[in-house]
């Protein structure tokens, strides 16, 4: 039952701007759960990726086709500027690749160090407080504009990519930081969310590939494993729909209150327990 609960927590917190990694650290501490390991978390991540692929299946199909079409046109000597001008989906596909690079480099180089350094609930709580501040400030200051797929620039992609890289800290929300970064660049609110969600696909798959091979070594009932992944997928789908609605209505500051309360309770209980 605890593994299914972790699937629910992973799904809700992966795309709500509240940090799934921070929540797993705190859930493990509060509920005294013994997590099966990184391979199990990788399986849950694949569940959340399925949800993104289902929700944005048309967009993803267009991006994949446009990406390979652009490679073909480049091989024929066509200029990248002309390709981007003639096909905005090709431009978006390449910008998503650019946004992935900072997190891929930092994640590959430093992930084990950060996971070891920030695995304690008190540190995760502090990072959640920072995430709450980002959401509050970003929601109030950055209104967003009409910049969409046809107007997004390479500079926008780089800034969003750097924001995603900073989410290597457990407790810093990847979706929250990337969406706020998008709004700071005047991206349309719904487009900023869509960009953030689709951007999660390559980085989560990349991080999971290194761990998924250990699935066979997990001492978990197959039905429980599948149900946990299914729970992560279903809850992720719902979380994305709700988040987009709140973002469009400028209501994401609600998550700040939640994060600050959770952070405060975690710090208080941690000190009471003597850890």
Image: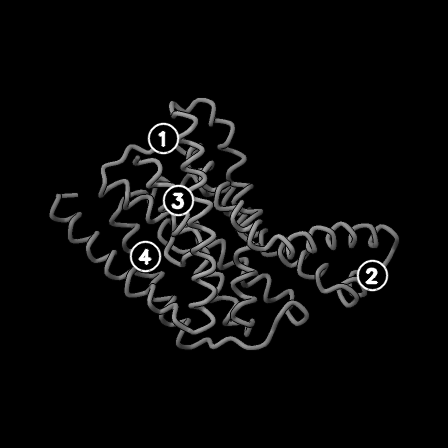
Closer to the chain start, of discs 2 and 1, is 1
Left or right, 202 with reference to 138:
right
Cα separation, mark 1 vs mark 3, equals: 20 Å
Query: Which residue corresponds to mark 1?
Result: 36
Mark 1 crowdedness (10 Å alpha carbons): few <14, some 14-19, many ≥20: some
Q: Earlier in the sequence, mark 4 or mark 2?
A: 2
Residue that numbered label 2 is attached to: 79
Distance from label 2 to label 1 (Cα)? 49 Å
The residue positioned 43% from the left and 51% from the top of the image is 14
Callout 1: SS? loop
Q: Is residue 260 above or below residue 214?
A: below
Q: Residue at left 51%, top 48%?
A: 51
Q: Position of residue 275 (x, y in %)?
A: 17, 43
Q: How is the image coloured?
A: one colour
Residue 205: which quarter of the image? top right
Labels 4, 1: front one? 1
Crowding around mark 4 (Cα neighbors within 10 Å: few <14, some 14 to 19, many 20+) is many
Residue at image mark 3: 114
**Image marks 4 and 2: residues in contact by CB distance under 8 Å:** no
Vertical position of residue 192 compared to residue 265: above or below: below
The Cα atoms of the two marked residues, 2 and 3, are separated by 40 Å
Between discs 2 and 3, the one toward the N terminus: 2
């Amino acid at each position: 039952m605890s593994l299914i609960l972790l699937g629910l927590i992973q799904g809700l917190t992966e795309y709500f701007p509240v940090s799934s990694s921070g929540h797993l650290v705190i859930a493990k501490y509060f509920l005294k759960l013994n997590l099966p390991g990184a391979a199990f978390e990788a399986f849950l991540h694949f569940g959340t990726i399925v949800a993104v692929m289902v929700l944005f299946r048309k967009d993803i199909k267009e991006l994949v086709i446009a990406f390979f079409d652009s490679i073909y046109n480049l091989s024929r000597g066509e200029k990248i500027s002309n390709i981007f001008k003639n096909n905005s989906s090709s431009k978006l596909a390449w910008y998503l690749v650019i946004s992935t690079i900072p997190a891929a480099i930092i994640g590959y180089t430093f992930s084990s160090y950060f996971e070891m350094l920030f695995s304690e609930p008190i540190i995760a709580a502090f990072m959640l407080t920072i995430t709450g501040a980002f959401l509050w400030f970003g929601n109030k200051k950055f209104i967003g504009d009409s910049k969409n797929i046809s107007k997004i620039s390479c500079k926008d992609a780089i800034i969003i990519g750097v924001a995603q890289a900073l989410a290597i800290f457990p407790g810093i929300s990847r979706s929250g930081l990337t969406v706020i970064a998008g709004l700071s660049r005047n991206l349309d609110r719904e487009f900023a969310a869509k960009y953030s969600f689709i951007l999660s696909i390559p980085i989560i798959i990349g991080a999971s590939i290194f761990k998924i091979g250990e699935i066979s070594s997990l001492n978990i009932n197959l039905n429980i494993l599948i149900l946990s992944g299914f729970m992560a997928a279903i809850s992720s789908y719902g979380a994305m729909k709700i988040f987009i609605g709140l973002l469009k209505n400028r209501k994401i500051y609600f998550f700040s209150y939640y994060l600050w309360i959770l952070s405060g309770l975690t710090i208080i209980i941690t000190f009471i327990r003597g850890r």
